[in-house]
Image (tube, coloured by chain):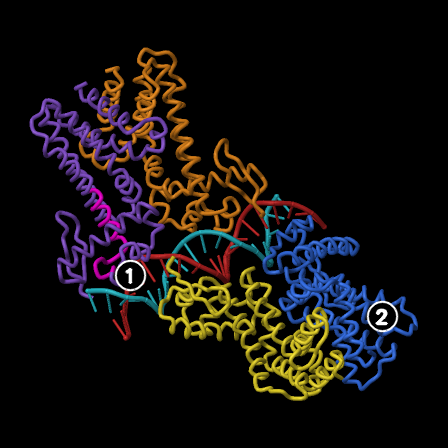
Chain colours: A orange, B purple, C yellow, D blue, E red, F cyan
DNA sequence: AATGAATGAGACTTCATTCAT
DNA sequence: CATGAATGAAGTCTCATTCAT
């Protein structure tokens, strides 16, 4: 068992045979970037480890020094992608302050970021079910955490209702925007980015009694 | 190996080596039912043609008399599943008449059917990207058709707005309910079926200015 | 799980994907003969499944229709080899009758057969530790059974002593002859087959108080 | 990469890249001890060079400074193990003197030492055929030398017969005791160490006309 | 001399598809 | 038309060995 353990904050552990942490971080990023790219293009199952290696400029043997299985790569890719999206939203909201229209700002941030990260979102929706139990749970836990984060942001923006309603609302607010990714083939034919975003913002504001 | 062609109403053609149309229909249904079942359980890529055969009580050789590839089976399964869901909604709305609350009835029908067909919906969202171009387009065409159908139903129920808004709205109405399937792992912890349905109906009514 | 089960009398089960029992028997024999040949020449670990396939005139895919793993092949080969040796001894002793010199005949049968099956015996001594637990136990059970058989034959030939002594004696009688295989590199330089056999028979007769 | 040559007394040469002979001797002993341990536990083929390194507290790179291949390690391990056993026997017999029962003492020494070195003996019988020609010949030469040593000891103890008979006898005396290792799974169920040793001594004494 | 990351050949195994019966 | 055995391409992963630092 030459593989040691590395714990990305809060996620599941992916073992590595390499000791130098900096190197692990760098090579993994190289690997993840390539994997995300090629998974988005061909899908996880159609992608071979060799494809990933080629895209990452790593030999197969080297890849397996930083990861124990192809599944690990998928996990790392999904984790990266989810984190990237959520961080982008959090970052957007960090500079929010106590504005009048905080709620609208939240909705807009969520949707706009979704627009920017469409491909990432699609990757998650297409491939996350190929994750094994542990990996999936780890990813879903991140999503849950994000839903809670949005729930709190909404509360801070003055949205109040029963717990169950807030729960559904937070789910709607985090889920409905995925439509821009999952229905883009149908939306793009008719609407521009701005139109879609505006329409969704308005729709949700009304749904949240803030129309 | 003369594969003739068979056109399932409106979809892409799947070739068969068998002449007798009735037999083709029967065997394919057998195949589809089994495939849907096993795909829902294990996923398309994890399922072997042998698995499907076992579930359908057909040998591998026989399967290939009614289908040209494993991909064909996926297409037939997806087509079946989408059609089943949409037919169920249409059926629900057929008995609608000119009620006052037609819009709410539409929304409720869409969501409730979604609840009933959760597993089917998941199958589509998980596996449709494994379809080849033609098959995917065929399925998406069905979805588009359904969105249009809902759009018209909404109009008939008195919802009027600009074309682009109606387009987005119809997309929201057909998309947001998939949340009950795609977020069930998070919703089920807190809410009952009725609560979720009611909340979604109310939310959408307001979003559509009918709250 | 397309593999059904086949139980070679008393041994562990090796699954097969093929239904026709006659075919399974024939193909397995083909496989086993080839495997024994090539294992004897190159050893189990140095032999690839492709090598076995080439020797057996079976493609790799076909092999895996009759066996689930390379380990299964080793098990089948070991089982065959042990059985062949033991059957040969039993066969020799079947025609024994109630002779005066029954004990000597037993010893001679064991040793001579060992001489004839030297290569088989070497295969067992070289590769049996590569078997997995279950397979090894199955093979060892066969050996134990054989030791008991010899023990009874010795008793029938008038050898009597305490149970523990009989146990050791039966072990010696079945073990010492393996020397002709395991020490052949050293024996062959000096002695002929007959000399070795005679010397061993005489030695054992004396050891068993029948000199 | 200039590998120089080092000759372990009388065996085949194993090259090293390191100059300092003391260091070579020390590191190799470290390596051998670890290798023997891990080979006994998992077998040669199942053991990776990394495993050996971990057990020896040496990195892979370092190992290859003292050895040219994994096969070299096996050779060193086998050589060590054979030597250890034989030295133990020789040591036992050194203090023998001109006793009446010298022959019995010899037999007892051989068997008892075999008992003590069971695991070593098993290692030889399990893995020596993985050695390459040269290495194997080197080990077998050691065995032959030992057989001759025992032959002479027997002669000194008054055992006399024709050359071929003496040769076989010496082989029996050195081979039969391996039964305590190779049949221990069957012997241990019934007999204690002392019983087995006594029975073997008695059996061999009689076989050698000294019963 | 030690380290440990990189390499890449090659092993086992799966499975969609074909085809003789 | 059904059967089910045969095929072989292709995939994942391991690991002995090398080599830059």
Above or below, D173 against D73 in this view is below
Direction left: furthest residue? B98
Residue C110: in magenta span: no
The answer to whether residue B125 is seen in the rendering is yes
Quadrant of the image occupied by residue B66: bottom left
Instruction: Name the chain under label 2.
Output: D
Nearer to me, B18 or D173: D173
Magenta segment: B63-82
Q: Which residue position is annotated with label 1?
A: B60
Q: Which residue position is annotated with label 2?
A: D105
Q: Is residue D91 left or right of residue B66?
A: right
Q: Is residue C24 left or right of residue B194?
A: right
**Within-10-Å neighbours for mark 1: few <14, some 14–19, many 20+:** some
Instruction: Name the chain under label 1.
Output: B
Q: Main secondary structure of the magenta part?
A: helix
The answer to whether residue A87 is seen in the rendering is no
Which quadrant does the C terminus of chain D fall into?
A: bottom right
Nearer to me, A51 or A162: A162
Above or below, B112 against B65 in this view is above
Q: Are marks 1 and 2 on the same chain?
A: no
From the top left corner, tell me how far across and down residue C207 is, in percent: 75, 78
Which quadrant does the N terminus of chain D fall into?
A: bottom right
Q: How many marks?
A: 2
Under tag 2, what secondary structure?
Answer: helix
Check residue D85 in the rendering and tell me which mark sits there, or answer none.
none
From the top left corner, tell me how far across and down residue C50 is, in percent: 46, 67
From the top left corner, tell me how far across and down residue B141 is, in percent: 17, 42
**Within-10-Å neighbours for mark 2: few <14, some 14–19, many 20+:** some
From the top left corner, tell me how far across and down residue B74 is, in percent: 26, 50
Above or below, A150 against C126 in this view is above
Image point (28%, 34%), residue name: A181
């Amino acid at each position: 068992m030459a593989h040691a353990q590395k714990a990305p904050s809060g996620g599941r552990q992916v073992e590595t045979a390499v000791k130098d942490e900096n190197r692990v971080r760098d090579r993994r990023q190289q690997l993840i970037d390539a994997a995300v790219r090629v998974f988005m293009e061909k899908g996880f199952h159609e992608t071979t480890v060799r494809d990933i290696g080629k895209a990452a400029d790593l030999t197969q043997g080297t890849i397996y020094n930083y990861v124990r299985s192809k599944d690990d790569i998928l996990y790392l890719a999904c984790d990266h992608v989810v984190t990237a999206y959520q961080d982008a939203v959090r970052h957007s909201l960090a500079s929010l302050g106590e504005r009048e229209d905080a709620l609208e700002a939240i909705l807009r941030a969520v949707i706009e970021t979704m627009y920017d990260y469409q491909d990432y979102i699609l990757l998650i929706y297409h491939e996350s079910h190929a994750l094994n139990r542990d990996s999936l749970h780890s990813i879903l836990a991140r999503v849950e955490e994000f839903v809670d984060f949005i729930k709190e942001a909404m509360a801070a923006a003055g949205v109040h209702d029963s717990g169950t309603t807030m729960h559904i609302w937070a789910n709607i607010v985090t889920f409905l925007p995925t439509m821009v990714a999952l229905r883009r083939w149908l939306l793009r034919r008719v609407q521009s980015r701005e139109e879609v975003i505006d329409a969704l913002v308005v729709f949700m504001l009304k749904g949240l009694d803030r129309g």
